[in-house]
Amino acid sequence: MLRLLLVLGLVLVLAGILMKLDVPLGRLPGDFHVRRGNVSFYFPLATSVIASIVLTLLFYLFRR
């Protein structure tokens, strides 16, 4: 449980640092945003893939 909290804390700190550096999290070129009339649909595909890769690497490093 301690490692999980540590990893989640590090991820939050990393996300905060990236936001301070004006990295466009959630607005990457592979993210889809469709507007039709008064309906809006947003699917963050590229952001999800990058987050998955980063979390996989972090969990791999802390599992060892």
Image (cartoon, rainbow, N blue to C red):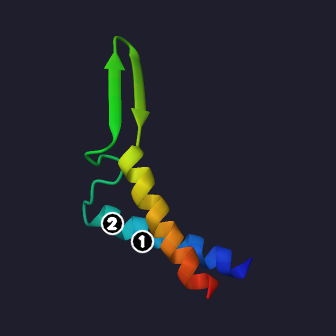
In front of the other: 36 or 53: 53
Q: Secondary structure at mark 1?
A: helix
Q: Amino acid at mark 2?
A: Leu
Quadrant location of the C terminus in the rendered image = bottom right
Q: Is the C-beta separation of discs 2 and 1 under 8 Å?
A: yes
The disc label shown at residue 14, or none:
1
The count of marks equals 2
Number of residues whose C-alpha sits closer than 10 Å to that of mark 2, classed few (under 14), some (14–19) or many (20 or more): few
Q: Residue furthest bottom?
A: 64
Q: Position of residue 57 (x, y in %)?
A: 49, 74
Q: Position of residue 26 (x, y in %)?
A: 36, 48
Please identify the quarter of the rendering in which residue 25 is found.
bottom left
Give the labeled residue for mark 2: 18
Query: Is residue 35 in sight in this rendering?
Result: yes
Please identify the quarter of the rendering in which residue 15 is found.
bottom left
Q: Position of residue 47 (x, y in %)?
A: 39, 52
In front of the other: 43 or 5: 43
Residue drawn at 45 percent across, 60 percent down? 51
Residue drawn at 28 percent across, 54 percent down? 24
Q: Residue furthest right?
A: 1
Query: Is residue 12 in sight in this rendering?
Result: no
Q: Residue furthest top?
A: 37
Q: Secondary structure at mark 2?
A: helix
Q: Position of residue 41 (x, y in %)?
A: 42, 27
Residue drawn at 40 percent across, 23 percent down? 40
Gap in angstroms between the C-alphas marked 2 and 1 = 6 Å
Residue 39 sits above or below residue 63 on the image: above
Residue drawn at 74 percent across, 76 percent down? 1
Number of residues whose C-alpha sits closer than 10 Å to that of mark 1, classed few (under 14), some (14–19) or many (20 or more): few
**Side of 51 relative to 61 (left or right):** left
Q: Amino acid at mark 1?
A: Leu
